[in-house]
Image: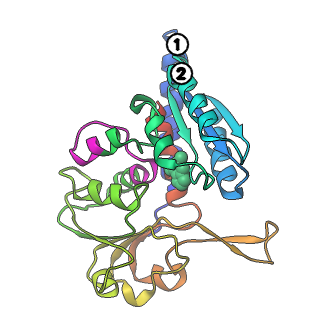
Amino acid sequence: MLLEGKIAAASINEFLKREVSVLLESGKRPPHLAAILVGEDGASKTYVASKIKNCAEIGFKSSLINLHEKTDINELLSVIQTLNQDTGVDGILVQLPLPNHIDEQKIIEAISPDKDVDGFHPVNAGKLVQGLASFIPATPYGIMLMLEHYNIETKGKHAVVIGRSNIVGRPISILLSGNSNPGNCTVTICHSHTRNLVELCQHADIIVAALGKPEFVKADMVKNGAIVIDVGITRVPDASKKSGFALKGDVDYASVAPKCSFITPVPGGVGPMTIAALMKNTF
Ligand code: GUN
């Protein structure tokens, strides 16, 4: 069965739209997300544009701050300081990756943890590890919301997460292993130094592919009936497309899908859920 992020995200968006009207009826203002984009990276521009568009669709206020590729770190820090202090701004996100001359960690740590809707600040990451209320990074949060939307039983299952990034792999491994529903999985995190990755995947009830290598997960790595969550979304050159590129997931969908009980498509799977989760955090 296909896990259609588009459909699950639409129901979250409908819920948030109604919540915004309740806020407005009680005389309050709508939630306000401020997004900062540094430079001209094509994929980042598309992602930020989708986030801003989604805000408009559900009645959130948004501000897009476009900064030049050569923006110096102090200028970026001062924009963040202003947004931190602005009581009219609820959520702040700085789209990653940043240009090489900017230290990403310094930027992440400059955002007030109370407005850190990406959940990347060490305070929020630490709270997540301890099972305390916190902002949960949007992609892993979106995956959990999708599992919940489709009522997928995860308790006691063996989940193999491929990738250990702070944005996806690490936090989803914590969420899936948590004492929650969805959750209560036994989790194995694989990375570039994992020796028996193929064998581990073959024993997985759930595979979360978040390594950023197009079509890495092949049919022979997947057990019959497995649940496969594809987080990858890489632009690969494709002359037959108007844009000049095609979007590829980390899973070889054509060969893997027939073996799965559930699988997410790319695009239209995890992507829309990530944005819906960001909206929930901002709300
Ligand atoms: N780059 C890739 N994913 C994300 C995300 O969830 N948030 C931000 N800010 N940048 C990203």
Figure quadrant of residue 128: top left
* Nearer-the-camera pick, 123 or 218: 123
- Residue beneath the point at 51% across and 41% down: 107
Question: Gap in Å between the C-alphas at discs 1 and 2?
Answer: 6 Å
Say which element carries label 1: helix
Q: Position of residue 279 (x, y in %)?
A: 50, 38
> Which quarter of the rendering shows the N terminus?
bottom left
Please identify the quarter of the rendering in which residue 127 is found.
top left
Q: Which residue is mark 1?
A: 25
Residue type at tag 2: Ser
- Residue at image coords 23%, 38%: 132
Q: Position of residue 84 (x, y in %)?
A: 50, 25
Q: Which residues are magenta?
A: 126-142
Residue on which the image places disc 2: 21
Q: Is residue 280 visible?
A: yes
Q: Residue furthest top?
A: 27
